[in-house]
Image (cartoon, helix red, strand yellow):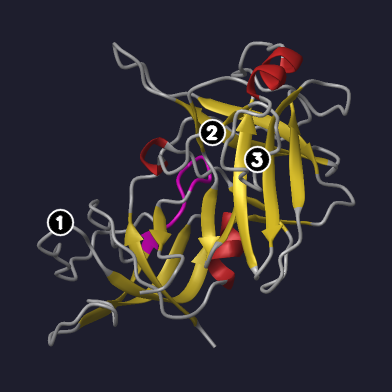
């Protein structure tokens, strides 16, 4: 059966190019003294947060406006109830002896709870992790290693300064061979999704009558907050384009008028980043 999604359109933010070989990223933070950073922070958390690993700085969470969703997502495998604890260790390059640049931590807490935490070795880094399902998060993929043993992820984004330099990605390589991880690229992820979802975005969708075809106007208008809402029933995928039955407003938005039509739209950018997004928690 065709899959039903509800997507909102959002501009994809491209901060780093794709590479497909095992090599150190060009845009990487300067070397840091891990021991001095760890010693200076050890024992400074009065809350006893079970997600703190005692290594490095806790990255700031929640700055998705300048993030990079990469070409896919890498997440730690878990179970719905009683998630286990695990850590993704990221290195400066794809060798185990290279410096550790970050740790992505999943911790199981009593009473069927859990938490995620990103620890880094330089200050003022925003967490670039991404929720892709209900309370399921992971790190965007920048590149796949040539032999499939390592994956490069975009774990963080630098803060803006004054004058406002463009935020820069922070990347690291993590060993995935034989590890309990789930790794998927966006084409497979989007085409395998299903269910009734809702999302918004302030960029008007670019509906076409075919891949790179003529524009199609379905009369989609923004809501009072400037957001666009529509459902997508995927009919066909071709490269970076999807053919879909569009319906709006979505079932999550109360409205007595329904518009619909079959159109094509681009769901991936030239660098493989998502050009559309979705509500990871449903309506």
Mark 2 element type: loop
Q: Which residue is mark 1?
A: 226
Write the residue at 77% across / 24% down. Answer: 93
Write the residue at 63% across / 60% down. Answer: 114
Furthest-front residue in view?
46
- When the figure is inspected, residue 69 is found, relative to residue 119, above or below; the finding is below
Mark 1 element type: loop
Tell me residue 212's x, y (percent). 36, 54
Magenta-tinted stretch = 265-273
Q: CA distance from mark 3 to mark 2?
A: 11 Å
Is 222 a magenta residue? Answer: no
Point out the tag, 1 or 3, that comes first from the N-terminus: 3
Quadrant showing the C terminus = bottom left
Q: Within the image, what quadrant is residue 189 found in?
A: bottom right
Furthest-left residue in view?
224
Q: Which residue is mark 2?
A: 59
Q: Which residue is mark 3?
A: 52
Label 2 crowd (10 A; few <14 / some 14-19 / many >=20): many
Point out the tag, 3 or 2, that comes first from the N-terminus: 3
Tell me residue 136's x, y (percent). 58, 61
Tag nearer the camera, 1 or 3: 3
Point out the tag, 1 or 2, that comes first from the N-terminus: 2
Q: Residue 236 or 224: which is nearer the viewer?
A: 224
Q: CA distance from mark 1 to mark 2?
A: 31 Å
Mark 3 element type: loop
Tell me residue 84's x, y (percent). 76, 61
Main SS, magenta residues: loop
Q: Residue 20 or 82: which is nearer the viewer?
A: 82
Write the residue at 48% across / 35% down. Answer: 60
């Amino acid at each position: 059966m065709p899959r039903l999604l509800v997507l909102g359109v959002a501009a994809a933010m491209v901060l780093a190019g794709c590479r497909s070989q095992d090599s150190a990223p060009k845009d990487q933070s300067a070397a840091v003294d891990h021991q001095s950073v760890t010693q200076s922070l050890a024992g400074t958390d009065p809350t006893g947060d079970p997600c703190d690993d005692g290594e490095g700085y806790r990255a700031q969470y929640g700055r998705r406006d300048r993030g990079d969703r990469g070409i896919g997502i890498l997440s730690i495998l878990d179970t719905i109830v009683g998630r286990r604890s695990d850590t993704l260790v990221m290195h400066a390059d794809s060798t185990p002896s290279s410096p550790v640049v970050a740790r992505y931590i999943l911790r199981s807490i009593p009473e069927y709870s859990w938490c995620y935490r990103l620890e880094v070795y330089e200050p003022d880094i925003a967490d670039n992790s991404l929720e892709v399902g209900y309370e399921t998060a992971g790190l965007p993929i920048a590149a796949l290693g040539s032999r499939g043993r390592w994956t490069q992820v975009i774990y963080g984004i630098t803060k803006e300064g004054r004058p406002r330099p463009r935020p820069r990605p922070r990347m690291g390589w993590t060993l995935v061979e034989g590890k309990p991880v789930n790794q998927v690229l966006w084409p497979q992820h989007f085409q395998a999704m299903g269910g009734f979802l809702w999302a918004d975005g302030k960029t008007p969708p670019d509906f076409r009558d075919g891949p790179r075809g003529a524009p199609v106007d379905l009369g989609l208008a923004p809501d009072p907050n400037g957001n666009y809402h529509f459902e997508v029933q995927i009919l066909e995928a071709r490269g970076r384009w999807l053919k879909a039955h569009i319906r709006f407003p979505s079932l999550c938005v109360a409205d007595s008028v329904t518009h619909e039509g079959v159109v094509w739209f681009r769901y991936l950018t030239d660098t493989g980043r998502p050009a559309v997004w979705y509500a990871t928690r449903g309506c």
